Amino acid sequence: MSIWKNEKNELTFKKLDSDITVDVCVIGGGITGISTCYYLNKENVDFCLLEKDTLLSKTSSKSTAKITFAHNVFFRYLIDSYGINFAKGYYLSNNEAVNEIIKIIENEKIDCDIKIQDNYIYTTKEDKVSLLKDEVSAMNMLGINANYQNNIPLPINNIIGAIKIPNQACFNPVKYCYGLINTFSNLNNIYDNTGVTNISKDGNNYIVTTGNNCKVTCKYVVMATRYPIKDIPGFHFLKMYQDTSYIIAVKTKEKIFDGMYISCDNPTISFRNAKYNNEDILLIGGNTNKTGENINLKDRYDILIQTANSIFKNYTILDKWDTEDCVSLDKIPYIGDFSCMYNNMFIATGFKKWGITTSNVAANIIVDKIIGKNNNFEKIYNSTRFKPIKNRKELYNMLKQTTNSMIINKLKIKSEDLKDFPNDSAKVTKINGKLVGIYKDENSNFNAISPICTHLGCLLKFNDLDKTWDCPCHGSRFNIDGKNIYNPAFKKLPKIDLN
């Protein structure tokens, strides 16, 4: 849970319990799915929205919710990799999204604590100064109002330099999305606790099947599920990986500085001020790791707490949470057609933690395709692209990890005696020749599941911070009872009886 969900009373809707027919079935109740429905509603298109849990229960409500086109140090990479016209299109699409979100908030009179802020990308490392100055040059080439500064309002030690980008924004993402929903002409077409288990073709239509075997017949399908729930023939599991980021919400009686900040150092640290129960607070985030990575996660919040210690003498941590997002190998989101073989099926994924702005880009591109309107930015995010891999090192790491998790690591597991198994710990072992994932809680109760991901069969790793079973291949996550909590897997893990 994050502060955004804690502060606002949750909107709940009924579960789909009968077959329905609509023009467009939007799957995923985060900011991308809700924004898509907002534009469909404006165009008087008949739609339904399906969410497997409750609306805004995952990444959207756990974001720092910065509304910006400045996605860390990125425009020099775009120019060098794809050319100035491509980079200009990426900038213009995201800048248009920033302005569009602000315009929606004004026109719909949405109370979501929006605040216009300067955005800063900073460094504490001498060897990163040239990187920032080169990024300013790239931004200026694209017509972006950005400048290099030695001094910024962020009160931490050793800041050497930064890029300042004015007139960006931040808000409460849950309040914003609830505001969008309240403009819908029909709220009876929103269904939560309605997970999708299959999407099939039926002539010119699609049949979307839910967990309780209800069916939605539709002409268009939009997968706004962060990670596509359909693998083939899109094969996006070969073109993306998932990262997990961490956030703490800090309350203090000391004055909290204005502005939004993110470092280009490693680890990345992010800051923004926010409102919580009508009080000013600070969000500190970052310290990313690849989901399912074989590391001890118990100290992931430590660097964020140390950062808070360096800023405030006295403060209280109101909440802390983590979330994950998809990163494409070429760093460009996939928005548009799911596959050349599937007309009228669309995806929006690979936002690399900048989904607040990119969700609006995606919603506009997809709705324009549905209503037959030309979109100037569609080609930038071509979701069926197959280009030379820009990040060959990460592709190699992905293939190596997949091979290890699907085959090699399974062979290394040996049978162990559970007699001396400590409390509050987990392991994967073999019992009667069968792989078993076991968690023993603080009260000496055992919980056993099959530790094989129901997506593509990778060996899961226990997350000792969140007490979840995480997939190192494609980022699916399951709770200790085996329930799926993050895609791309949607089937639960089988329980195993140890008696």
Image: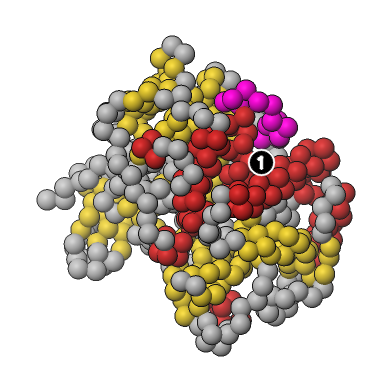
User: Callout 1: helix, strand or loop?
Assistant: loop
Q: Position of residue 360 (x, y in %)?
A: 60, 43
Q: Name the outermost residue toward the bottom.
A: 313
Residue in the picture at 30% in, 41% down:
14
To which residue does mark 1 refer? 332
Q: Position of residue 420 (x, y in %)?
A: 22, 66
What's drawn in magenta, residue-wise? 369-381
93 to 275, vertically: above or below:
above
424 relative position to 72: left or right = left
Residue in the picture at 46% in, 76% down:
317
Q: Is residue 444 visible?
A: yes
> What is the three-letter code of the residue carrying label 1?
Ile
Which quarter of the rendered picture does the N terminus lie within? Answer: bottom left
Applied colour scheme: secondary structure
The front one of 420 and 9 is: 9
The front one of 29 and 422 is: 29
Q: Is residue 66 magenta?
A: no
